[in-house]
Amino acid sequence: MSIAVNTALLISKIAAAFITGSIGLYAESAHSLFDLLASFLAYLGIRKAEEPEDRTHHFGHEKFENLSSMLQALLITGTASVVLFEAYQKFSEPGKVDFSEAGILLMLISIPVTYFTSRYLGDVAKKEGSSALEADSAHFTTDVVSSAAVLLGLIAVKLGFPQGDPLAAAVVGLVMLYISVELLLHSFFVFMDFSPDKETMAKIKGVLVAEKRITRFHKLRARIAGSRILVDAHIHLPHGMPVETAHTIAHEIETMILREVPQVKEVNIHIEPD
C-alpha cells in the first residue's frame, strides 16, 4: 500500500511541478521520490526480519528492520539538505509559478490521502512492533505537513507574494530534517541495545513480583532487538524443589510475561536454589 500510494503521489507531483515550475512542488517531488525508495527499503527490511535464525544469526534478523529505518532516515536527510539549499538560492530571486491552481488542487487531494495512509501505517506499525513501518508512517506524516506548507506557499504566490514558494520549500526541508533526526535516534537506541521504556519494564517486573512460588528474583534485564524485546531474569526457588517442578514454574513465568507484555518475544529464566 505504501509503495502504491507513494508512486501515485510522485507521478502527480512531478507533473504538477513541470506545469507550474514551483520549487515547492519540486521539493515535494523529491520528498516523494525518496519516500518511495524508503518504502522499498521498509519492504525489504521487513521481509529480511521475518527470516528465522540461521547459522550466522542465532538471534534472528530483527535488526534488519532498524537498519532499514536508519537508511530511510539518511535518505531523508540528504533530500532535506538539497531542498534547503535550493530554497535558499531561490528566496532572493523567486522563480515564476504558472498555473498555481493545478498545484493547489493537487495538494488539496494529496493531504487527506497522505494523512489517512500515515494513520493506517502507524496503526499497523504499533500493532506489529515494526520500526520499518513506523519510519514509513513518519514519512507520510512529513508529507502531510510539507504538503500543507506547499499549499500555503502556492496560495501566497497566487496572492502576489512570490517568496511564498521558496519559503514553503524551506519548511518542507526543515520538517524532513526533524523527522530524520527522530528516526536516526530511534535506530541508534536499538543498535546500542537500549532497554525498553520504564512502563514496559514495570509490566515485566510485575509478573515476577506477583509470582508467589518464587522466593525472590534478580538480574532482570531486557533489550530491544528490532521489533522484539528479549528478557532475562534469575529466579530463586526453595532449596530441594524437584527439577521438574522448578522447570514448570520457570516455563509458566515465561508464558505469563509473553502474555502480559506482547512486545516481548523471548524470555530466558535462570533457576537458582535459595
Image (cartoon, helix red, strand yellow):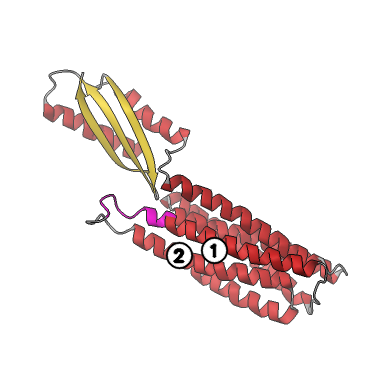
Q: Nearer the viewer, mark 2 or mark 1?
A: 1
> Is residue 89 placed above or below 180 in the rendered structure?
below
Q: Are marks 2 and 1 in contact (CB under 8 Å)?
A: yes
For marks 2 and 1 on the same chain, the one whose residue lies earlier in the sequence: 2
Q: Element at badge 1?
A: helix
Residue at left offset 30%, top offset 59%: 51
In the picture, the disc for residue 41 is 2
| Badge 2 amino acid | Leu
Binning the other alpha carbons within 10 Å of mark 2 as few (below 14), some (14 to 19) or many (20 upward) gives many
Q: Element at badge 2?
A: helix
Q: Which residues are magenta?
A: 57-66
- Quadrant of res 141: bottom right
In the picture, the disc for residue 75 is 1
Measured in 3D between alpha carbons, the distance from the residue under mark 2 to the one under mark 1, in whole angstroms, is 11 Å
Residue at left offset 67%, top offset 69%: 27
Can residue 151 be seen in the rendering of this structure?
no
| Badge 1 amino acid | Leu
Q: Position of residue 245 (x, y in %)?
A: 15, 27
Residue at left offset 25%, top offset 54%: 53
Name, please, the residue furthest toward the right.
160
